[in-house]
Amino acid sequence: MPTDHKIELDALAFAQALIRRPSVTPKDAGALDVLEAVLKQLGFATHRLPFGDVDNLYARLGDAAPHFCFAGHTDVVPVGEGWNADPFAAEIKDGKLYGRGAADMKSAIAAFVAAAARVGKQKGSISLLITGDEEGVAVNGTVKVLEWLRTRGEKIDHCIVGEPTSAAHAGDTLKIGRRGSINFKLAVKGVQGHVGYPQKAKNPIPALAQLVTQLAAHRLDKGSEHFDPSTLAFTSVDVGNDATNVIPAEARAAFNIRFNDKHTPDSLTNWVKDRAAMIAQESGCEITVTSQTSGVSFLTAPGKFTQQISDTISSITGQVPFFSTSGGTSDARFIKDVCPVVELGLAGATMHKADECVPVAEIEALTEIYAAVLTAYFAKPPL
Ligand SMILES: [Zn+2]
């Protein structure tokens, strides 16, 4: 092994090796073993971090600051139906690499490792934080690894999450934030009774209808500097009453809010509870509000870090990346509590679909971008 740890690593072949491990959440199927073996060869100090039924890998090259981390996941979503290619054979057809995880996100992991191999040891540290539980409930993955790092006193300074966030080509988009997501359930309890004697009952349906109308009609915000307006969408209104002569005792509804940086799960929950309390008072019904946050919003405000990455990308692609905050949630929602984080990866058009694939040329393009990002970062850390 050369002392500066620089070895040639073919990103495409490595992506194929990862895809050939059918690591459907939360199974690892040897994917992390493949990754760990290569990282060890490159001189990384590796740690396997199993929590519950999920295996994770943290690997670091160097121990000085600044510390640049690449985060991602080796787990993939189930195959589903309708494939023409073998989802775990990693075949190349017409210049495209096919397989579950080709886009989301084994090729990005391979690109990052190949980039790290190209630039070699730097004045600072390069690490990988790879979880086997991103596509699942995300309880025993990134959250637990970050906690483990904190107890060891290891500090990450900047992070790229390699999710497939680009639109058409690697580097055309830089995700600097994502909206948060929270699910609500409403249960309105009245008093059951005969439809002929409504005065003796307390009908929960008009109360629920009123609450649904109020919540759905409310404009949460007009958007913020970097985000689209928050949205609220009802997913269910449910009484479940087949009888035509009975006023039911209870009516339920459910809705989801995708929220920007003008809200928090607490502020939204308080708003919904206030509205519910008002209608409960007017109607005499009892209204229960329950909520579950599936992700808080995050924003890495444009600054030195995002500028450096943007400049680096455009020096390679000739195109300034679009700063985006759209889409669902990712593990960046946890990492944002530790350091500035952005998402930069392949185009994700086929992620989670049948015949998931990525052009072979895009894997090389992403490798080149990652390598340039690392070189620029350690030449002039954006601290
Ligand atoms: Zn993913």
Image: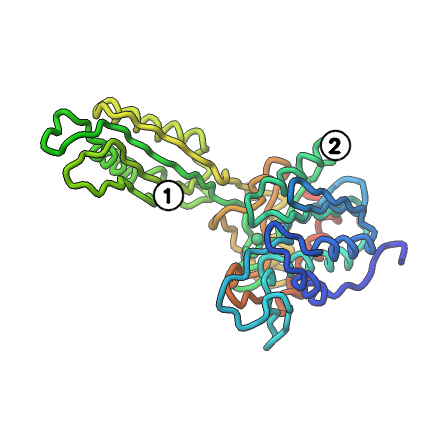
**What's the mark number on residue 231?**
1
86 relative to 156 in the view: left or right: left
Please, is residue 366 above or below residue 266 in the view? below
39, above or below 193, in the image = below
Q: Mark 2 vs ligand 1: CB under 8 Å?
A: no
Q: Residue visible at 52% across and 69% down?
A: 83
For mark 1, give the secondary structure.
strand
**Do we see residue 154 in this rendering?**
yes
* Amino acid type at image mark 1: Thr
Asked whether, in this view, residue 44 is left or right of residue 144, the answer is: right
Question: Where's residue 113, x and y in %?
Answer: 73, 56
Front residue of 117/92: it is 92
Residue type pointed to by label 2: Gly
Report the side of 94 relative to 185 (left or right): right
Quarter residue 214 falls in = top left
| Residue 92 on image: x %, y % | 63, 73
Residue furthest bottom as drawn? 94
Front position in the image: 100 or 58: 100
Which quarter of the rendered picture does the C terminus lie within?
A: top right
Residue visible at 19% across and 27% down in the picture: 202
Q: Nearer the viewer, residue 383 or 223?
A: 223
Q: Quadrant of residue 108?
A: bottom right
Which residue was labeled with disc 2? 153
Q: Which residue is depicted at the point 59% across and 66% down? A: 87
Quarter holding the N terminus is bottom right
Tell me the element at label 2. Answer: loop
